[in-house]
Image (spheres, rainbow, N blue to C red):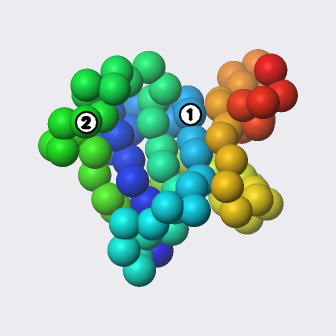
Amino acid sequence: MAAWFSRRVIEGERPGYVERTSDRINKFDSGWRFYVGDESQEYLDTAENCVMQHLGHALERWPDVANLITTAPAAGEWIWDGAEARFRPLDAE
């Protein structure tokens, strides 16, 4: 399965905002989206700045993503909480 990544995440920055959507681009799309979290809409609207890559990319670089992926509901938004070293639901702020 594949996921969308901000190019900044692909280049090594930690995902700070993760979402899972029911909107799928194709049959390989898992619905997961990984962003640093401060990308502008203009940045995200530029095709070269968003990359579809195997979901395993996130699991290999950030093992804490595995817990989120295996326990998350079908749709939602999460942010990285550095103090707790985990992703927490965005609506829990």
Q: Quadrant of residue 7?
A: top left
74, 3: nearer the viewer? 74
Query: Horizontal and vertical percent for residue 41?
Result: 34, 26
Q: Residue at x 55, y 30 (%)?
A: 16
Q: Residue at x 45, y 66 (%)?
A: 24
Query: Is there any visible trace of residue 11 in the rendered image?
Result: no
User: Which one is in front in this view, the residue at disc 2 or the one at disc 1?
Assistant: 2
85, 27: nearer the viewer? 27
Looking at the rendered structure, the number of numbered marks drawn on it comes to: 2
User: Which residue in the rendered view is the most extreme toward the front?
Assistant: 23
Q: Earlier in the sequence, mark 2 or mark 1?
A: 1
Secondary structure under tag 2 reads helix
Query: Is there any visible trace of residue 75 in the rendered image?
Result: yes
Q: Quadrant of residue 50?
A: top left
User: Which residue in the rendered view is the most extreme toward the bottom?
Assistant: 27
Q: Is residue 52 above or below residue 27?
A: above
Identify which amino acid the numbered label 2 is placed on: Asp
Query: Horizontal and vertical percent for residue 65?
Result: 63, 50
Residue that badge 1 annotates: 17
Query: Horizontal and vertical percent for residue 1?
Result: 46, 74
